[in-house]
Amino acid sequence: MDERMYREQIIDLYENPLNFGSLEPADFTYEEDNPLCGDVIRIYVRIDEDNRVSDVSWSGEGCAISQASASLLTEDIKGKTLDEVKAYTKEDVLELLGIQLSMTRIKCALLSLKVLKAGAYGMPDVEELRKG
Amino acid sequence: MLDVRSLKNDFPILQQDAYEGNSLVYLDSAATSQKPDIVIEAMNSYYRNYNANVHRGIHRLSEEATTAFEGARERIANFFNAPDPACTIFTKNTTEALNLVAYSWGRRNIEAGDEILLTEMEHHSNIVPWQLLAEEKGAVIRYLPFTDEGLLEMSNLDDYLSRRTKLVSFASMSNVFGTINPSKSLVEAAHSVGAVAVIDGAQSVPHLPVDVQELDCDFLAFSGHKMCGPTGIGVLYGKRSLLEEMPPFLGGGDMIRKVQFEGSTWNDLPWKFEAGTPNIAEGIGLGAAVDYLNDIGMDNVHAYEQFITGYALEALSEVDGLRVLGPQVGLKGGVAAFTLAGVHPHDISQLLDEDGIAIRAGHHCAMPLHQKLSIPASARASFYLYTTTEDIDRLVAGLNRVRKVFRLD
């Protein structure tokens, strides 16, 4: 673990995020915000006939930690099965980030995981709810 | 001008390093202020020497505790020139004080179709209690807008007031813009249509001289912990005629005159609104805080904060990409909320923390204000009587380091 929260890789990903953009149509998409800091992340996932992640993207805005975490997580799930995606844990994400986080910032890091898992488990998307 | 360097020695927490070799720069006083030694000692002394419940025991300790607690109330009432200490009700904080008005006065007096006027720059605690009330009663909430500069649109005030307006509630100083609002004009306007005027003094009472008789407001709410006092103690001031008519807020011990199986009658003011054992140490602590501020003089506190805010705004204007929200110095108190292009406020705050600098990042419990500005959040540095020019210089150096880390130079 790197003691510096803002090591080069985090800033690189903030400047040039991976898998950034929308992906329509997607097999599932989900969005959530962290009202305390105003971070918003939406994730789009396409699943192939083997039930594996064939394509993934994310959009949204927020702090460098939440943005880097979304880049790293979406990159990591490519080719994984839906069951493997559902099994991702908090520890997996923190390991991907490779930095030490304070209590208050862990929420930023885990927003993308929360969004991904809610989508994978088939939570109704907020856009669908808005449409009624 | 205040001798801030010697004054800073009164605050034990400000003597420490935040991290090894980095002395603490505390710029989050709008969230909560630090406490001088005499406040901490006043509370310790109560617990060490005369801890007992108030208004109850016929024994030496209880007499001593009651005298100290009620003595504190009198000095606190004098601090904002209440005509009578009985109209100074102890609450947990500003939020509870505003809720008390909404529940007790609001439930009895607000009816379907009535209007409640707030402003667009209110803290959530001066929005949500009224939303709950309006929902229950079928009343309507209106919001007086703010301008691009972060000033209330006073010229349009008449459009927001009518005979339907029953209550006007506003912060006399904004916790984001720092705007010092024209309280007296707002109170007069409220009264001109027969509405009750409520002032959220959470930010103003700690920083400016406030005189309820001069303002003629019907209610004033504020918190002890933002004015050198402890958490867990706040004040609701109300005009006696209104408080007398209002039903109790919470029921229990201390607020009753007589309890019978068939029903109860209420104690006199202020105890009618103070059910249960109060925060005794905290009341005594706030009394000590008021003594401390009186010794310095609130005019001096205000004048010093104008100086340090002017210094800060000037220094911050040198940081590329930084935009301070709200009006210029003279129209605002010691608050500088800002955005820095290309960096999220959380990242700003985190990096400043590495330098030992404490600021706030987020929406500061004012989400509607941020929505109107189309920004998710802001960073906020806020000042008090112990803030030095060196603190501001450290902030600016820290912000320039943030720019470097984020490769903005």
Image (spheres, coloured by chain):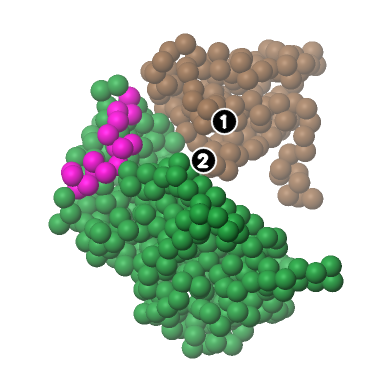
Chain colours: A brown, B green
> Is the residue under label 1 in contact with that under label 2 (CB below 8 Å)?
yes
Circle 2 is placed at which residue position?
Answer: A37
Among numbered discs 2 and 1, the one appearing first in the sequence: 2
Q: Is residue B337 above or below residue B21?
A: below
Give the amino acid at mark 2. Cys
Give the amino acid at mark 1. Lys
Element on which disc 1 rests: helix
Residue at position x 47%, y 33% in the image: A63
Circle 1 is placed at which residue position?
Answer: A107
Residue at position x 45%, y 76% in the image: B84
What's the magenta region? B4-19
Counting from the top left corner in percent of width and height, residue B230 is at 44, 48
Counting from the top left corner in percent of width and height, residue A112 is at 61, 28
Residue at position x 39%, y 36% in the image: B349
Whether residue B10 appears in this view of the structure is yes
Relative horizontal placement of residue B275, taking residue B339 as reference (left or right): right
Whether residue B147 appears in this view of the structure is no
Counting from the top left corner in percent of width and height, residue B256 is at 68, 68
10 Å crowding of disc 1: few (<14), some (14-19), many (20+): some
